[in-house]
Image (cartoon, rainbow, N blue to C red):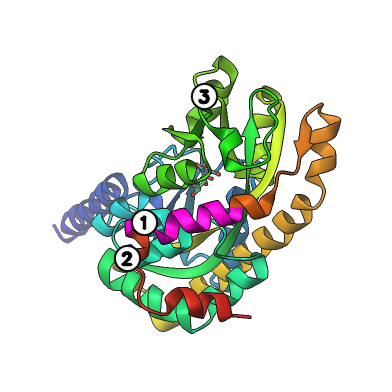
Amino acid sequence: MKTSLLRRTLLASASAVLLMGTLLSPAQAQNKVVLRVSTPAVPDDWHAKMWTVFKDNLEKSAPGEFDVQINLNASLFKQGTEPAAMARGNLELSSISAFDIAKLVPEFSLFTAGYVIRDPEHQQKVFNGPIGAELFKTVSEKMDVTPLSTVYLGTRQVNLREVRNVKTPTDLKGVKLRMPGTKEWLFLGEALGATATPLAFGEVYLGLKTGTIDGQDNPLPSVRAAKFYEVTKQIVLTSHLVDGIFIAVSNKAWGAMNAAQKQKVTAAAQAASTYNNDNRLKEEGQLVEFFKQQGLQVTTPDVDAFRKSVQTTYQNSDYAKVWPKGLLERVNQTQ
Ligand code: KDO
């Protein structure tokens, strides 16, 4: 009698364990903190590879504690929809752009404007100093995500399907320049003098190949990683936007972590950014030669003419009206 009761109890607990195993993912069953990452980055780009650095760093500092799941090529969430997914609790980590943030934090549109951030060093100083601290607090309050580190995406250049003599914004008149599909991005394309055409990053290669667009703008390492150089003939070095993205964590995931975990996740995000920033900067210095070898023309326009025109367009726009008084001056004065 006693033995059969024991057997029944053992069987019941064994099936409870089995049931748990089928309902929970292996990571949950082992009590790991699941961190899902979604990014449109292509595997060979530095801001895709940095997530492996993040994962490895965390595995070293907190062995077995986290399960980092990396989803590239916008395979989990469409480009630009990551912040909403994080706020809903469907995603834990992503790298979000100033353009994504400006939708909910209008003053952030200052960083969507061309020719504001001067260079990668200026970018790090602005976002790692008091301006970044103030703005990131607002981002957390309004978007329910916490920015952890600033990633240099590169300096954006114009990349054309056919060779064109481009010296000033007037020379881009009528050019269907692909931009990501939000109004802040389209405004930048128009400010450059082109006809801005919305398209997701994943569709740009085919758009250039078939001619539904005449060009696109991106930093040189992304032109290389996404192979846009295979379907274009010219790069115009406008250097119109020193672009940044921010590694951000959903506040739901962040709030569930203890202090030690938060510190380790922050350190991993910083290691990932440093890896990206160092490699991207180095590669940016080498790519003009590479593109020339691939048969592209790399030309330098009248950058001052682009700067003046783009800055004036932004100053006279509704965007500038929501920039807090003195913010642009503070950014300009940051050394
Ligand atoms: C792009 O779509 O042009 C862009 O460069 C915009 C960035 O904010 C970022 O989303 C990036 O694409 C992707 O990470 C792909 O490199």
Q: Secondary structure at mark 1?
A: loop
The foreground one among 319 and 184 is: 319
Looking at the rendering, the stretch of residues picked out in magenta corresponds to 307-318
Q: Secondary structure at mark 3?
A: loop
Report the amino acid beneath label 1: Ser
The foreground one among 56 and 137 is: 137
* Callout 3–callout 1 Cβ contact below 8 Å: no
Q: Position of residue 107 (x, y in %)?
A: 35, 67
The foreground one among 76 and 144 is: 144
Point 63% across, 42% down: residue: 168
Left or right, 285 with reference to 17: right
Q: Position of residue 203 (x, y in %)?
A: 49, 28
Q: Is residue 66 above or below residue 72?
A: below
Q: Which residue lies under the disc numbered 3?
A: 213
Outermost left residue: 1
Q: Position of residue 269 (x, y in %)?
A: 54, 67
Point 37% across, 42% down: residue: 77
Q: Which residue lies under the disc numbered 2?
A: 321
